[in-house]
Every structure is written in structure tokens, then in C-alpha cells.
Image (cartoon, rainbow, N blue to C red):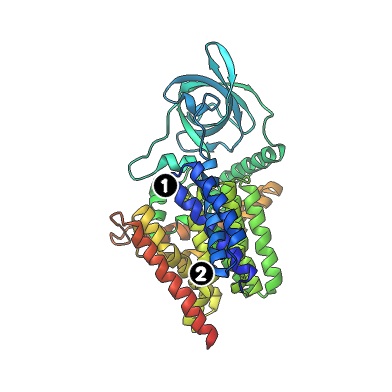
């Protein structure tokens, strides 16, 4: 007799498999419709549990394929991408946060009109505009743009076209002529959140010098503008880029360490859980509620929930349900979004692999939450290593050590940074006094990172490995997690 939880797990996994297959192989939709109709007949005539379960799995696999293909753009004159490789004049609203870099600003424009033969026609679609730093453009402004629209392409080993496709961007525009028409578009709540974020960023720059200011802005409000290229490269070489990258990878690790730290300070586990949840909610909101950060926050909450409940076995269905809902909303993130993949894997590692490691390293010291930091870091690094090697062809030999030295102070620096900003609004000298402590902590992180990154063997590039090797690595990890944990439960 099949349990409902088993049937649910099969349906969710089958749906994800269908999306994954459709990401690589095109199947004509009429085949999918015939397959769905055949499955419906199978539900009527086949009642044996295993056969029925197989039909259910096939049905949801086909649904996953159908959902992915339904997310692909339609090439017609109603979409702005139809006019790629042509000089075009179009208009639309800025409905996403403007990404300011050192030498340019990136604007995601939701186009609604295009000028054809001196007549404005309705269109749909998003255009990524790369413009000079000045004049500044903001969320909610309505712009008229003139440029040559370009189709995104891969850049060397980076699938830039797929990276943009997950955000439904199929057109690029480089340094165009821009005319600001009006303002007041978009969501009012998002507008105020982004304005508040901008105010916080200015206050951080007032309190802390560079590069610590950009570093603090990255870990506190998700702004990465101004981080020097040398420091970014050092983060990459030492395997700690996740502390400034907004993903479930860093949120789950930091939230877990924060939870352990609160418990270490004598706060009850229940209250520590609520503190960590509030921190995640605040972080997601202050970052402006982009979809990637919302997904990251959800993954972080799942880890906290599993640790608070202490019932790992019940998390499987919750985890695949959350992943299924995210992919139902945007099926492209399953294959094309490395951030989502790392978030999902890090969550699996902290939920399933960390308890296995805890049984192996029971004698680790608990001073300053050292044990929790080591276990959390090790679980996240191990579970994401095959994907990182496959996706980025890089592996850091010092990642585990640097993470253990750095991660425990990140929640501390975030708390101090938040207090410095708050008191900086009340009385600037007090905020500057607290900011000096923040600078000290961040300087420690930077010094550790630069020290270990200078060694030639701290990180090395690997030739591209076949995806089959990556899958073999994960099958081995599945064996370790589930079979070893089963033996532990028997004992």
C-alpha cells in the first residue's frame, strides 16, 4: 500500500525531472498532450500500486515538460525581442532595482511600446540596458530609449544568454540615448523599500571607509557596488564569495550560525529560532524583495525549521514542495540559475548531511560555537563541491579553513553594522564609534582572505568535467547521507 507522502514525493520529483529534461531536449507539444491523455487512460485501467505510481510519475514528468516549454518566449511582433539586431526606439518602465556598478548602471526596462514607421505599437518583454553612471535612473521611472537591440550570447564559458533567460530577458541595449518621460510607475511598497535601502547605503558610506563600506553594504543590504576587483578575486580563490552573494547558500549558513550563537549566549532555542527568522525577513525586505533573494530567504527558513523541529525525516516533502513551487513559477531556474542550485544543495546539506557529520565528530569542542561552525561549513562545502567544480571549474583547497575563520564573525559584523547605522541616524559620533568596531571585524575578514588567497595552491582551475562525473558525486553523497544515517538510526 502506497503512502500519500510517497506518492507526493514521486509527483514532485517527476515534475522536476520533466522540467530538467525539457531544458535540454525539445519535445513537440502534441507528443506531450498525447502522453498526458495516455496517462489519464492509465489511471482508469491500471490499479496495481507500482504501475499506478509509474503512471503518476510519467504524468507529472510530462507536466514539467509542458510548464517549461510554456515559459519560453514567443517570437512575434508583440515582443520586443522580435526587433533584436535592429535600431529601435522603445519606451517602458523601470520595474526592477537599478544595479549600479563602478563604471556603469544596469537598468531592467519593461517595454510596453515601440516606434515602427512613426507609429507607436504595443509590445511586451524586458530589455537589459547598460548605461553610463550619470544621469541616474531609478525604480518606477518611465523612459524612452533609442539603441540597437542585441540578442544575448554566451561569453566564453559563461552562458550569459541562459543567465538572462531565467529573468525573462532576451534583449540587450548598450549605452543608448535615454529620455526620462515621467515617474510614479511600479509598486509603491517596493519603491519605498528601495529608497530606504539607498538611504542606508549612503549612511554606511558615511560611517565606514572603503573597501569595508562596500563589504558591509554587501552583507547587510545586498549591495555589492564598489568592492575592489582584487578583493572579489580573493573571495573567489578562498571560497567565501557566498558571504557577499545573496543566495540561500549564504543565508542558510549565516542563519544557522546565528541560531547557534544565540543559543550559546543563553537564549532559549525557541527564542533563538524566532530571532533568526526575523533577521531573514528583515534581510529579504531590505534587499528590495527580488525573486532570487525571496527564494534564498525561503531556503534559509527551511533549514531553521528543520533544526528547530529536530525531525529531518519530515523535511523531504516540504523541501521538494518548496522547490516545486519555485520552479512552477519560474521553471528556468532549475538548470540556468546557479544561485538557486547552490541554495537548494546547501539546504539539503544542512538538513541531511550535517546530522551525519555531527555523529562522526561528537568530540569537537563547543567553545564559541566552534563545533556548529565547523559542521555547518563542512556540510555546505561538501554538498556543493561537485556542482561548483562542474559549473565554475574551480576548487579551493583553503575554503574550509577560511570559512571556519571568517563565518563566526559575519553575524557579529552584521549586528554591529546594523546598530552603527541606526545610531548613526540618532547621533553621528555614536554611530561612528560603533562603526569603528565594524571596521575592525571586517578588516580581520579581509586580511584573512587576502593572506590565504596569495598562495598559489589556495585555488586551482580544473578542466571542464562531464556532467556524468558530477552526478556520480551526488549519487555517492546520497549513499553517505541516507544509508549511513539509516545505520545510525538502527543503532
- Marks 1 and 2, the one that precedes in the sequence: 1
Q: Residues within 10 Å of mark 1 (few under 14, many from 20)?
A: few
> Is the Cβ of the residue at disc 1 closer than 8 Å to that at disc 2?
no
Q: Is 438 in front, or is 231?
A: 231
Say which element carries label 2: helix
Q: For the residues carrying marks 1 and 2, which lies nearer the camera in this image?
A: 1
Q: Which mark is residue 14?
A: none
Q: Classify residue 299 by image quadrant.
A: bottom right
Q: Image quadrant of residue 90? A: top right
Number of residue marks: 2
What is the C-alpha distance between the residues marked 1 and 2?
37 Å
Q: Which mark is residue 25?
A: 1
Residue 258 in view here: no
Residue 54 sits above or below residue 22 on the image: below
Residue 336: x and y in percent read 46, 48
**Left or right of 430: which side holds 38?**
left
Instruction: Quickly name the residue at label 2.
Output: 376
Residue pictured at 42% horizontal, 31% vertical: 151
Of residues 229 and 341, which is closer to you in this image? 341
Q: Residue at x 50, y 67 (%)?
A: 349
Q: Nearer the viewer, residue 173 or 441?
A: 173
Q: Is residue 461 left or right of residue 128?
A: left
- Which type of secondary structure does the marked residue at label 1 adopt? loop
Residue lying at 63% horizontally and 57% vertically, measured from the top left: 280
198 vs 350, nearest the viewer: 350
- Give how far across and how far down residue 16 sits, in percent: 52, 55
Image height of 164 relative to 283, above or below: above
Amino acid at each position: 500500500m502506497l503512502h500519500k507522502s510517497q506518492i507526493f514525493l514521486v509527483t514532485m520529483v517527476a515534475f522536476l525531472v520533466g522540467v530538467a529534461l525539457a531544458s535540454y531536449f525539445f519535445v513537440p507539444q502534441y507528443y506531450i498532450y498525447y502522453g498526458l491523455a495516455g496517462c489519464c487512460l492509465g489511471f482508469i485501467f491500471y490499479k496495481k500500486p507500482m504501475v499506478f505510481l509509474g503512471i503518476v510519475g510519467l504524468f507529472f514528468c510530462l507536466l514539467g515538460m509542458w510548464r517549461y516549454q510554456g515559459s519560453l518566449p514567443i517570437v512575434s511582433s508583440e515582443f520586443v525581442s522580435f526587433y533584436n539586431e535592429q535600431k529601435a526606439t522603445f519606451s517602458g518602465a523601470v520595474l526592477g532595482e537599478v544595479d549600479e556598478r563602478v563604471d556603469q548602471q544596469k537598468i531592467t526596462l519593461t517595454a510596453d511600446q515601440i516606434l515602427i514607421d512613426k507609429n507607436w505599437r504595443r509590445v511586451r518583454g524586458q530589455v537589459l540596458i547598460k548605461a553610463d553612471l550619470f544621469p541616474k535612473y531609478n525604480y518606477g521611472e518611465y523612459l524612452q530609449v533609442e539603441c540597437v537591440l542585441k540578442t544575448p550570447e554566451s561569453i566564453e564559458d559563461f552562458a550569459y544568454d541562459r543567465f538572462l533567460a531565467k529573468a525573462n530577458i532576451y534583449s540587450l541595449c548598450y549605452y543608448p540615448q535615454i529620455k526620462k518621460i515621467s515617474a510614479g510607475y511600479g509598486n509603491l511598497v517596493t519603491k519605498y523599500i528601495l529608497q530606504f535601502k539607498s538611504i542606508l547605503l549612503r549612511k554606511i558610506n558615511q560611517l565606514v571607509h572603503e573597501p569595508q563600506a562596500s563589504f558591509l553594504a554587501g552583507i547587510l543590504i545586498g549591495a555589492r557596488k564598489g568592492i575592489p576587483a582584487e578583493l572579489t578575486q580573493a573571495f573567489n580563490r578562498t571560497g567565501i564569495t557566498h558571504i557577499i552573494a545573496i543566495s540561500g547558500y549564504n543565508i542558510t549558513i549565516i542563519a544557522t550560525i546565528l541560531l547557534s550563537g544565540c543559543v550559546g549566549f543563553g537564549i532559549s532555542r525557541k527564542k533563538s529560532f524566532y530571532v533568526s527568522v526575523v533577521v531573514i525577513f528583515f534581510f529579504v525586505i531590505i534587499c528590495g524583495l527580488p525573486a532570487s533573494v525571496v527564494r534564498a530567504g525561503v531556503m534559509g527558513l527551511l533549514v531553521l525549521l528543520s533544526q528547530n523541529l529536530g525531525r529531518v525525516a519530515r523535511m523531504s516533502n516540504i523541501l521538494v514542495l518548496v522547490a516545486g513551487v519555485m520552479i512552477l513559477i519560474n521553471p528556468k531556474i532549475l538548470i540556468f540559475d546557479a544561485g538557486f542550485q547552490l541554495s537548494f544543495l546547501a539546504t539539503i546539506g544542512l538538513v541531511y548531511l550535517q546530522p551525519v557529520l555531527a555523529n562522526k565528530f561528537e568530540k569537537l569542542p563547543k567553545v564559541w560555537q566552534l563545533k556548529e561552525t565547523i559542521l555547518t561549513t563542512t556540510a555546505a562545502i561538501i554538498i556543493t563541491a561537485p556542482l561548483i567544480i562542474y559549473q565554475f571549474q574551480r576548487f579551493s583547497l583553503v575554503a574550509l579553513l577560511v570559512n571556519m575563520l571568517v563565518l563566526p564573525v559575519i553575524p557579529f559584523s552584521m549586528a554591529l553594522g546594523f546598530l552603527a547605522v541606526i545610531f548613526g541616524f540618532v547621533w553621528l559620533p555614536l554611530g561612528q564609534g560603533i562603526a569603528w568596531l565594524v571596521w575592525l571585524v571586517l578588516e580581520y575578514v579581509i586580511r584573512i582572505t587576502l593572506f590565504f588567497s596569495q598562495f598559489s595552491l589556495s585555488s586551482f582551475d580544473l578542466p571542464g568535467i562531464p556532467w556524468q562525473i558530477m552526478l556520480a558525486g551526488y549519487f555517492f553523497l546520497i549513499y553517505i547521507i541516507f544509508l549511513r544515517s539509516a545505520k545510525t538510526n538502527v543503532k
